[in-house]
Amino acid sequence: MRSIIALVLAAASWPGLAALNIFACTPEWGALAQELGGDKASVYTATTALQDPHHIEARPSLIARARRADLVVCTGAELEIGWLPLVLTQSGNPNIQFGERGYFEAASAARMIEVPQRVDRAMGDVHPAGNPHLHLDPLNISRVAKALAARMSLLDAQDATYYIGRELDFQKRWHEATARWEREAKPLQGLPLVVHHRDLSYLLAWLGMREVGILEPKPGVPPSAAHLAELLGSLQQTPAKAVVRSAYQDPRAADWLAGQARLPSIVLPFTVGGSERAKDLFGLYEDSIARLLGATK
Amino acid sequence: MDYKWLCATALALAACQAFAQEQRPRQAGENAFNPSISLILQGTAARSSQDPENYRIDGFAPSGGEVAPAPRSFSLGESELIISANIDPYFRGQLTAALTPENEVEVEEAFFQTLGLGKGFTLKGGRFLSGIGYQNEIHQHAWDFQDAPLPYKAFLGGRLNDDGVQLRWLAPTDLFLEFGAELGRGRAFPSADSSRNGAGAWSLFAHAGGDLGASTAWRAGLSHLQAKPEDRAFEDSDSLGNAVTQSFSGTSKLWIADFVLKWAPNGNATITNFKLQGEYFRRDESGSLTYDDGTALNGAYASRQSGWYLQGVYQFMPRWRAGLRYDRLDHGTVDNAIVTGGLGPSAADFGPLMTAYNPSRSTVMLDWSPSEFSRLRLQLASDKSRADVTDYQVLLQYIFSLGAHGAHTF
């Protein structure tokens, strides 16, 4: 009986009105798709800001959502390699397979940094296409927005003017906000930071902050006591102003080092939903900058 | 089709240009189309109080699979070579070859799978891990314990990977609902490979799954496998030690109910997480049994047997996991007309089939994964598969995966 009720409920929740059914791998692309799609798009976000985007499982709920998606919006650059291929093949949905028009990778439109010259697993969990956490560069958001709006127009030609119109409006607001953030973040220039993982590199590069240490001994390898002790020693030569980590990361290593080195420990939202204020992409950037500025006072 | 038409309209011109621009070639040359390759290396160092060579599950027909515990001393496990790629826009292909420590190559899986059938349908063909149960479809290197649960050993010879076709359909609902059907040759237990036209075994399965809040995900399933073994034989000895051959012909029906529940704080499994998994098996077999110690006797045979296991694995800190598993088989009822009809042999002459014994096993494990590509495991077990003795087992296992980043099923 209960399963029948579940079936009826599930059937009732079929979206019929929205023109585009979008499956976003991570919250930032979900937020962007919603900005561009407005009420013509129904957006499902597969992960939250409190989940490590590298380690997501191909849960049944994700496969069920991918089944009905018209468009999958993901980061690419192998960020979702551990789960997305499985979700796609099990979805039985031909429109969102790799290379189809319903498959969109932000990395294909973005400018990548930290592209390794050579890759070897001895270097840890490195990404051959470059650092995949590309959404913390506002120019990348702008580039991806352009490509994504174009893709949405392609899939839902009837509403193309609507998507392009929303995109132009978004670009205008984003451009103004970016200029404002760059002014506000002037004091951050040259700020030396210890990071947990290289997931904030784009933000650091954009605002001219410096990375003087990484809590992970190698990408994807959890911080070890020996590595933290070594890092603490090296901070004597190259002092940092703060230890920063993202909301989804284990707080213990950052808090330990911050305590030992008497530095503030800053938690950045990393993506939409990572903090109270990071309700959308604008909030994400505003809150991140505000939290970093706190360390300079 | 509509794409070309669309690109011709002025409105979408910018869109088409952008679509063309974002497709950047990553790699050039002939190698660009090489399939992804990954290799699994594994091995064990084991001690056991009973010789694994004499392993048997009392009260159950030998399944003929690789069900014995890890060999004593140092021993190489199966090295798995997995090669997969999209074949074209319509198909995907995969080969999983196991290089056994006996220097043989075994094809575990070699299948094609459709990509573009649409409407939620996926067709698979070749040799593949069957979709019945939960653990059956999971590759051995991704198991949470070194060996298979007892019901898998007794009822499926470790796992089912028949040659055949599989059709799956995923319902267009927010609740994960998947239905599947398989037709197979019946090349291994519970079938007995026979030269006949048509399918020797078929199965049906249904899976449902979803999330309970942000922290918990679940999946549950029901499966049915039906096989028609002909002369499914094994060698045994009677109560006096004389060699006999026993063989079964008839119908074998297996039902499996399975569930798995995964929990992680806010769905972030990197620091701590917990996985609870259990399956219940029930098998009904009816047909005839032949008992041959030189002169063949034949009689009706029917059995109803069951088994289950429950296991929990807890990651208590990054890299470290501890697990506990309990498995149990229920001998159930066995009607053997050769015995009840007074044809000569008594129940004592049917060691594996008629020993009224319920095998059980308790296993604990602790594993450490320096990265997601390497794992070292310590496993201890008290195994009461044999009626008269308890086998205490201890083993160390390594599992390394090289090459392409494999995606693991839920």
Image (tube, helix red, strand yellow):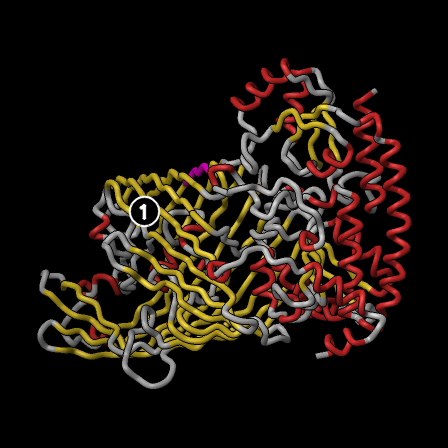
Residue B116: x, y in percent?
59, 74
Q: Residue at x 71, y 56 (%)?
A: A24
Mark 1 is surrounded, within 10 Å at the Cα level, by few (under 14), some (14 to 19) or many (20 or more) other residues, namely many
B202 sits to left or right of A70: left
Q: Residue at x 65, y 26 (%)?
A: A254
Q: Residue at x 67, y 63 (%)?
A: A103
Residue B256: x, y in percent?
46, 65
Please say whether residue B366 is one of the residues in the magenta stretch.
yes
Residue placed furthest toward the front: B29
Location of the C terminus of chain B by quadrant is bottom right
Q: Is residue B304 visible?
A: yes
In this figure, which residue is indicated by the disc labeled 1? Answer: B383
User: Is residue B84 placed above or below B51 in the rendered structure?
Assistant: below
The residue lying toward the viewer, choosing from A262 and B270, is: A262
Dot 1 falls on a residue whose secondary structure is strand
User: Is residue B31 placed above or below A129 in the rendered structure?
Assistant: below
User: Is residue B323 placed above or below B89 in the rendered structure?
Assistant: above
Give the extent of the magenta segment: B365-369
Residue A136: x, y in percent?
74, 41
Q: Which residue is drawn at 17% across and 66% down?
A: B235
